[in-house]
Image (tube, rainbow, N blue to C red):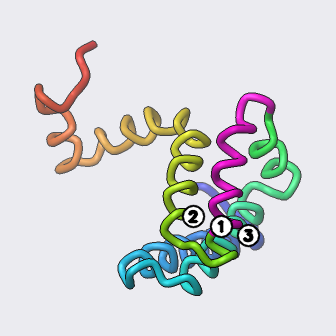
């Protein structure tokens, strides 16, 4: 079991609420207010979970500047009031930022009983 500090627990809650508000904002036809709240909560939660210094180092690495500019630019565009364009920019930046984590996530999901059997089907799994 992983032990979390109190600030990390708060960060997990903020990140969860941020994802919820982002999802709910997209369901409600890109509601500007919900998307803005979701963006702020997600970034704040990430800062609480891994710390301010590590968050800053993660976002502002030289090879991640393009991804960071798309993600934070999308957040800014949503806050300005153009939610659809902002969400598209955020999603692109998110995939660029976190693309190194996707193989780890897929490897973890393959160990889950039902989802793992689906991911291990011949036409879905990548050839080794």
Q: Quadrant of the N terminus?
A: bottom right
Q: Nearer the viewer, residue 6 or 43?
A: 43
Q: Position of residue 77 (x, y in %)?
A: 65, 67
Earlier sequence position, callout 2 versus callout 1: 1
The residue carrying mark 1 is 77
Query: In the picture, residue 52 is in which quadrant?
Result: bottom right
Residue 58 percent coordinates (x, y):
76, 43
Q: Circle 2 is placed at which residue position?
A: 86
Magenta span of residues: 62-77
Question: How far is the residue under mark 3 from the one under mark 2?
Answer: 18 Å
> Is 1 in front, or is 43?
43
| Magenta-colored stretch includes residue 74 | yes
Q: Which residue in the rendered view is the most extreme toward the left?
A: 122
Tell me, for residue 1, which label it has, or none: none
Q: Is residue 111 magenta?
A: no
Q: Nearer the viewer, residue 76 or 95?
A: 76
Determine the image quadrant of residue 109: top left
Q: Main secondary structure of the magenta part?
A: helix
Residue 44, numbered circle: 3
Residue 32 horizontal/vertical position (percent) = 56, 82
Q: Is residue 67 depicted above or below 19 in this figure?
A: above
Q: Earlier in the sequence, mark 3 or mark 2?
A: 3
Quarter the C terminus occupies = top left
Going 69% across and 74% down the picture, which residue do you hit? 40
State if disc 1 and disc 3 touch (CB < 8 Å). Answer: no
Q: Secondary structure at mark 1?
A: helix
Marks 2/1 in contact by CB < 8 Å: the verdict is: yes
Sequence-wise first label, 3 or 1: 3
Q: CA distance from mark 3 to mark 1?
A: 18 Å
Describe the element under mark 2 as helix, strand or loop.
helix
């Amino acid at each position: 079991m992983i032990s979390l500090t109190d600030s990390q627990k708060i960060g997990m809650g903020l990140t969860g609420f941020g994802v919820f508000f982002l999802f709910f904002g997209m369901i409600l036809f890109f509601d500007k207010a919900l998307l803005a709240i979701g963006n702020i909560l997600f970034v704040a939660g990430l800062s609480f979970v891994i710390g301010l210094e590590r968050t800053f180092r993660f976002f502002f690495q030289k090879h991640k500047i393009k991804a960071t500019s798309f993600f934070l630019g999308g957040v800014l565009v949503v806050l300005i009031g153009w939610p659809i364009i902002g969400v598209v920019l955020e999603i692109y930046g998110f995939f660029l930022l976190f693309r190194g984590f996707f193989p780890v996530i897929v490897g973890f999901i393959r160990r889950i009983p039902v989802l793992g059997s689906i991911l291990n089907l011949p036409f879905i799994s990548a050839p080794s």
